[in-house]
Amino acid sequence: MVYTIKQLSKLAGVSTRTLRYYDQIGLLCPTRNPGNGYRVYDTQALLLLQQILFFREMDFSLEDIQQIITCPDFNVLDALEAHRKNLLQQVKRFNHLVDTVDKTIMHLKGEKTMSEGEYYAGFSEEQEKRYTAEARERYDPQMVEESVNRWKSYSKDQKNQILEEGKVNTQVLAALLDRDPGSPEVQAVIMAWHKNIEHFYPCPYEIAKGLGQLYVEDPAFRANYEIFDPKMPEFFQEAINIYCEGKSGLPDFSRG
């Protein structure tokens, strides 16, 4: 069977823009239908795209992925065995996160005392990378490389500081849920959040609003923010939208 770019996009959950970009850089090149010249993908291309997505899940750069899959020694079966090992490690980490959620629920119900440090057990730099990758995938795939390179340029201390700032912003916002999303106090937190996101990748208003949408619609994002309060995802999104619409008069950090 062969698939059109739209069919493959729907099947794999990858945007057509991303598939065209992969074709442009020679990472995943379709054949052409001789009748109409449209891109078509065969079964081999489907397996190759699966490998690309597996490696992207492990935060390999597109350049590194291209070198790996074009290597004469590349073996799909060996790659799948490596992916399986990596996924089992991810399962272990997610189980740790589930344990953190369970403890937090018990804490909020008064059934268990939980230290502040335990709030973040199981969270990691890998999670931050996944979040930013999801946001970038909705927009421009070329941002992936810039983001990875930007993060790699930081020292360990800088990375820890950036992640800690993000956690503090979330805690402060959670403490302001009784305020108006457009209030100066809330908007100051959103400004700090926007600046923190800029450490990962350029974040103009369009992408910032997209993140706000993810916080409400994505189950993983929503679950993390609902730990603080069930209303927090929608509150966060509304505050971001107000910020992006310029009602607060605060600057867009992505524009310098």
Image (cartoon, grey):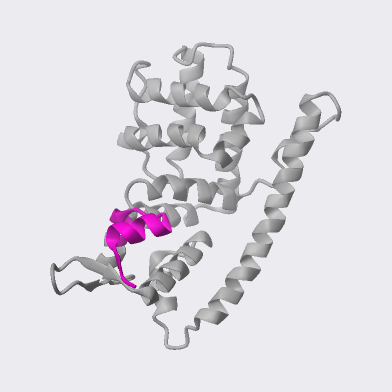
Residue 254's quadrant in the figure? top left
In this rendering, would 21 be left or right of 108? Answer: left
Residue 256 visible in image = no
Residue 208's quadrant in the figure? top left
Q: Does the magenta stretch include residue 115?
A: no
Give the camera-side residue of 245 and 50.
Answer: 50
Q: Residue sitting at 62 percent across and 69 percent down?
A: 84
Q: Is residue 7 magenta?
A: yes
Quadrant, the C terminus: top left
Residue 210's quadrant in the figure? top left
Q: Residue 20, percent across and down?
A: 27, 61
Instruction: Indicate whether 77 appears above or below 5.
Output: below
Query: Which residue in the rendered view is the most extreme toward the front?
Result: 1
In this rendering, would 52 be left or right of 169? Answer: left
Q: Predominant secondary structure in magenta?
A: helix
Residue 75 visible in image = yes
Q: Residue sitting at 67 percent across and 31 percent down?
A: 227
Residue stretch rendered in magenta on the structure: 1-19
Q: Residue sitting at 32 percent across and 50 percent down?
A: 140
Instruction: Indicate whether 226 appears above or below 134.
Output: above
Quadrant, the N terminus: bottom left
Q: Residue 108, percent across and down?
A: 77, 25
